[in-house]
Amino acid sequence: MAYKRDTICVQGGYRPKSGESRIPPISQSTTYFYESTQGMADLFDLKADGYFYSRLANPTVAAFEGKVAALEGGVAAIGCASGMSASTMMAFTVCNAGDNIVSSSAIYGGTFNLFAVTLPKLGIETRFFDPDAPAEEIEKCIDENTKIIFTETVANPSIKILDFEKIAAIAKKHGILFAVDNTLATPIFCRPFEWGANVVIHSSSKYLDGHAAALGGVIVDGGNFNFKGNSRYASFNIPDESYHGLVYADLAVAPFATKCRAQMIRDMGAIMSPQNAFLSWLGCDTLALRMERHASNAKKVAAYLSKHPKIDWVWHASLPENKYHALAQKYLPDGQGGMLSFGIKGDVHQAAVFMESLRLITQETHVADVRSCVLHPASTTHRQLTKEELEQAGVPENLVRLSVGIENPEDILADIEQALAKIR
Ligand SMILES: *Cc1c(COP(=O)(O)O)cnc(C)c1O
């Protein structure tokens, strides 16, 4: 039965048997006991489902994976150590040296570094495109070695909203895997698989955990991409010598997630810890409720800032004048999330006075948890980027990123008001 998202938040991913604990126990164990050698052998051969070593799978992590897979409407998920390890494992699952990723330039700074600096050292190149460019422009980045088209639903920190149908059509036309980082939208506001995405990743360190308590990432397999006979994905169509000759494209369910876990997680060990999986699972219980409040608070703050004389510009798709308002109405009609960016009139100095004058809202290298926080990306998360790269990533130097929490909106607005008043 297909439950609604708020029901999945509290009921998904774990169902105890009679007499078992109602919520998933923290299976703080590296290994698992088996009575027979054959039972263990079947697990190694992927003939049976079960646990044998926590670098591959763990019951607490599986509960979290199951909840996120259900929320996104995917067929399988993999809990990773962090959002960055999720994007790295995603890339390695399909890319070898010589391959390339075609990525939106409006993405999280850490992912930009991974794609622009680290993966090239391993022979995997990234071609960046402006997500607002017409399809013909974006298509020019694609060649026979392109393995992923990568985007973010709501870009961090430029708050651009993705035109899913445009990108999905390009991916489909060329038979390329379409992967989306859905961290800032969450499945409460947008489910990318419904719009043609094939893989969804999350930094669960953000809204899914929601309490700034547990680092984590998730890769969700939409189960809607045909690898079989697709010459672009040779590694899915030839036997995996490291897995007894398994041909991933032949698997009826989740070839992407299976290859990712059986090869990449096995060899690189980027799995989520049971403790973090437990906290993230628990966080998801209130995801739907929290997102509603994050979005309504952010909408109020955006409306307030957009009329303030000391504010240059505000980016939040709830504003009717926002360039992405129409796309947001289509793809995120129930709420555009709790993140907004704005520019304070003046230079970096005025921004610093504002940030340091805040009392309730704190300066943090984090976003998307219950507490409101601010950050100046150009001097923190994005400081490795050159001025040109900052422009390309849609992060002007005077941009302040505000992650609106779930406090009472009047308190949030009062804090912003008194801090803006300190700017002379
Ligand atoms: C934070 C973030 C990441 C990286 O996640 P970590 O859990 O910090 O490794 C990736 N994508 C987006 C959109 C993020 O906000």
Image (tube, helix red, strand yellow):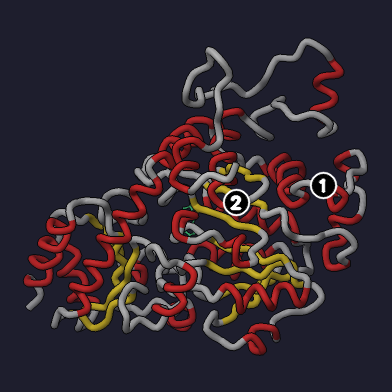
Q: Residue furthest top?
A: 35
* Number of numbered discs overlaid on the protein picture: 2
Q: Going by the image, does 153 lie left or right of 74?
A: left
**In the rendering, which numbered label is found on residue 194?**
none
Residue occupied by mark 1: 252
Relative to 316, say whether 52 is above or below: above
Q: CA distance from mark 1 to mark 2?
A: 17 Å
Residue 210 x %, y % = 38, 46
Relative to 121, say whether 85 is above or below: above
Specify whether tag 2 is near ligand 1 (CB below 8 Å): no
Residue 35 x %, y % = 78, 10
Residue 69 x %, y % = 59, 46
Q: Residue at x 46, y 77 (%)?
A: 327
Q: Residue at x 28, y 59 (%)?
A: 404
Q: Residue furthest front?
A: 1
Residue occupied by mark 2: 73
Specify whether tag 1 is near ligand 1 (CB below 8 Å): no
Assign a secondary structure to mark 1: loop
Graded by Cα atoms within 10 Å as few (under 14), some (14 to 19) or many (20 or more), the crowding at tag 1 reads few
Relative to 358, say whether 101 is above or below: below
Q: For the C terminus, give its image quadrant.
A: bottom left
Q: Amino acid at mark 2?
A: Gly
Q: Residue at x 63, y 55 (%)?
A: 88
Residue 115 shows up from this direction: yes
Q: Amino acid at mark 1?
A: Ala
Graded by Cα atoms within 10 Å as few (under 14), some (14 to 19) or many (20 or more), the crowding at tag 2 reads many
Q: For the N terminus, give its image quadrant.
A: top right
- Dots 1 and 2: beta carbons under 8 Å? no
Residue 224 x %, y % = 72, 58
